[in-house]
């Protein structure tokens, strides 16, 4: 689907929030699928580039980029009912408080298909190399979310995709696919280093 431009010359978007990319805060503009009432495609498109989005524990619990939300247990992309691990239908689920770390940044407002991955403790995780945020019982992540790692050179927040990949290669973290999140594009904000 080709997006029509708004009067400001940008594609229409359905939501916007702060995210991380390469250790800096940026703004993301999201197109929710049309079947969910938005401006976006109803499925990933071969015509768009892809970007991975790492869903990490909130870097600052007092200022989460994605606040916790309780919602009916219906997949917002497919409209299908959600089930637990045993296949039993759920009534409600919690989108846990989290921050998003974007792996790719395409310039000039290029819309990309987004694919989300919960960042969880891996088999080599310990208190000495991974910090996590606890999650509610009915969390979509179903495990604590990682937010900082020590690869031998001190604690660093997981706000850079390269750091997420390094921790993944060492089995300190594991990734769990969340969903295709629609189309989105990033825009720079005034520079702010991830000093938390």
Image (tube, rainbow, N blue to C red):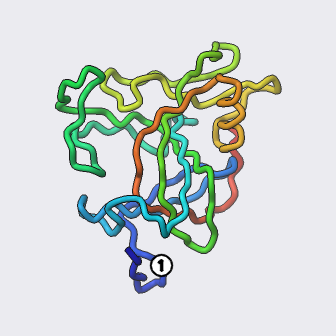
Q: From the top left corner, tell me how far across and down residue 132 is, in percent.
A: 55, 23
Identify the residue at horizontal 69%, vertical 30% (top origin).
169
Find residue 171 and report its image quarter. Answer: top right
Residue at screen point 19% across, 39% down: 81
Q: How many marks?
A: 1
Residue designated by label 1: 10
Depth check, front residue: 21 or 75: 75
Above or below, comparing residue 74 to residue 89 in the picture: below
Looking at the image, which residue is at 39% across and 25% down? Answer: 142
Residue at 41%, 52% (x, y): give it: 181
Question: Which of the image's four quarters has the N terminus?
Answer: bottom left
In this rendering, the answer to whether 40 lies above or below 59 is below
Residue 61 shows in this picture? no
Q: Position of residue 118 (x, y in %)?
A: 49, 35
Does any portion of residue 139 appear in the rendered image?
A: yes
Residue 187 place in picture, x, y as percent: 58, 65
């Amino acid at each position: 689907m080709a997006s029509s431009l708004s009067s400001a010359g940008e594609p229409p978007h359905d939501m916007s929030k702060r995210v991380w990319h390469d250790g800096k805060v940026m703004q993301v503009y999201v197109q929710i699928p049309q079947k969910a009432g938005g401006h976006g495609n109803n499925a990933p498109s071969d015509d768009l580039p892809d970007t991975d989005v790492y869903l990490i524990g909130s870097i600052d619990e007092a200022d989460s980029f994605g606040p916790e939300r309780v919602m009916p247990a219906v997949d917002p992309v497919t409209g299908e009912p959600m089930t637990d691990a045993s296949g039993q239908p759920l009534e409600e689920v919690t989108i846990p408080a989290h921050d998003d770390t974007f792996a790719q940044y395409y310039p000039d407002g290029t819309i990309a298909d987004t694919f989300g991955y919960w960042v969880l403790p891996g088999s080599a995780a310990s208190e000495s190399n991974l910090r996590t945020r606890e999650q509610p019982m009915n969390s979509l992540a179903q495990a604590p979310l990682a937010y900082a790692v020590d690869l031998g050179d001190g604690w660093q927040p997981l706000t850079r995709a390269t750091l997420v990949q390094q921790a993944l290669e060492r089995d300190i973290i594991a990734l769990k696919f969340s969903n295709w999140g629609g189309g989105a594009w990033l825009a720079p904000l005034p520079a702010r280093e991830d000093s938390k």
